[in-house]
Image (cartoon, rainbow, N blue to C red):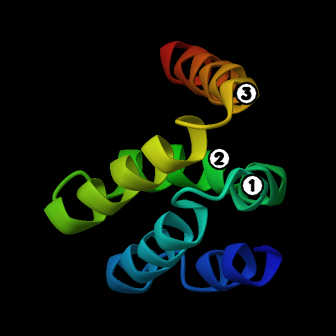
Amino acid sequence: MDKLITLATRFSDDPFVLQEVMSIICTLSLRAPDNATRAIEAGAGDLAIRVMNEFPEVPQLQKHSCLMIRNLVVRNPENRQVLLDLLTSFLGVLSV
């Protein structure tokens, strides 16, 4: 997971690379709570929130990001709070 996040960071200005990273994390975390935990720990939640904000005009990237978030939290209730906290802090930064 760390390598995927590193790849996404390296190509942070390319929505198509980011879309593929989201898709891969989505697939890896589907019905795999351990992988979902690893993804959250690697920073996938931060990445999803940032990417969705930076590229609202890329529908497939938005779709894969939403599906990834769903897979990260559906079998990991503890990840729900982590993502809510990330989103709250992100929205707090936007309102300042």
Q: Earlier in the sequence, mark 3 or mark 2?
A: 2
Badge 1: residue crowd in 10 Å (few <14, some 14–19, many ≥20): some
Three-letter residue code for mark 3:
Val
Pinpoint residue 17: horizontal percent, then vertical percent: 43, 86
Q: Is residue 8 visible?
A: yes
Q: Which mark is residue 82?
A: 3
Q: CA distance from mark 3 to mark 1?
A: 11 Å
* Left or right: 42 in relation to 53: right
Residue nearer the viewer, 53 or 67? 67
Three-letter residue code for mark 2:
Asp
In the rendered image, the quadrant that contains the N terminus is: bottom right
Q: At numbered mark 1, what does the secondary structure look like: helix, strand or loop?
A: loop
Q: Which residue is mark 1?
A: 43
Q: Which residue is mark 2?
A: 46
The residue shown at (48%, 64%) is 26
Residue 3 lies, with reference to residue 53, above or below; the image says below
* Left or right: 61 in relation to 92: left
| Corner quadrant of residue 35 | bottom right
Question: Tag count in the figure?
Answer: 3
